Image (tube, helix red, strand yellow):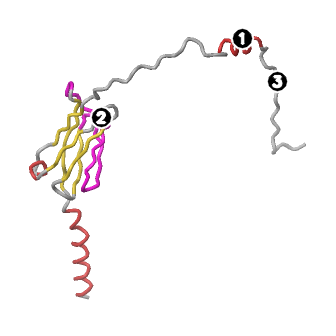
Amino acid sequence: MTRLAAVCFVLFFAWRTPLAAQLPIRGQVLASENDQPLSGAEIYALRSRRGAETDRHGRFVLWLRVIPDTLIAHFIGRAPDTVVVSDSAAAGGAVVFHLQSPAVALPGVTRPRALPGHSRARRLRQSREPSRATCSVVSPFRRR
């Protein structure tokens, strides 16, 4: 009986050890132009292979297994930012990302005036009479 208790004791602490080794990293993702929080930005830790997403205030909490680690923040339409997390950030300091807008502006899409054959197709559509076709539904459950 004492062996069973000893084995259970060892297994219990062996199971809890990886959970105790995780450290919470708190931070915020902001736009670099106006310091507005970016909601829905994704943060990924390279060595720990963990990820998180920001809330509506741009804040996140990421649980890391390995310190130091490299964090990468992504947001649609912005250049990604990288921060190396050390022991000071794990001790309670916050990690702040400032994501910049890309320097390249995309050209606008313009619609051509008329495509070849477009006016001919429009005239054909307007000349047709509306369809007067009827259809009937036959129920497979109806008795004849």
Residue marked by disc 2: 39
Q: Is residue 122 left or right of residue 66?
A: right
Prevalent SS, magenta region: loop
Local SS, label 1: helix
Q: Is residue 47 left or right of residue 105?
A: left
Residue 29, position as x, y percentages in the image: 23, 36
Q: Is residue 85 left or right of residue 99?
A: left
| Residue placed most toward the observer, 118 or 47 | 118
Residue 38, position as x, y percentages in the image: 27, 33
Q: Quadrant of the N terminus?
A: bottom left
| Residue placed most toward the observer, 26 or 42 | 42
Please name which of the two marks, 2 or 1, marks the residue nearer to the observer: 1
Stretch in magenta = 33-58
Residue marked by disc 3: 133
N-terminal of the pair, mark 2 or mark 1, is 2
Residue placed at 22% from the left, 47% from the top?
A: 71
Q: Would you call the spot at circle 1 few (<14 residues within 10 Å), some (14-19), or many (20 or more)?
A: few
> Residue 31 lies in magenta, yes or no?
no
Residue 36, position as x, y percentages in the image: 23, 28
N-terminal of the pair, mark 1 or mark 3, is 1
Q: CA distance from mark 2 to mark 1?
A: 49 Å
In the image, which disc is placed on residue 14?
none
* Amino acid bearing label 3: Ala
Q: CA distance from mark 2 to mark 3?
A: 52 Å
* Amino acid bearing label 1: Arg
Q: Would you call the spot at circle 2 few (<14 residues within 10 Å), some (14-19), or many (20 or more)?
A: some
Q: Is residue 62 left or right of residue 77?
A: left
N-terminal of the pair, mark 2 or mark 3, is 2
Quarter holding residue 122? top right
Quarter holding residue 129? top right
Residue placed at 30% from the left, 42% from the top?
A: 42
Please name which of the two marks, 1 or 3, marks the residue nearer to the observer: 1
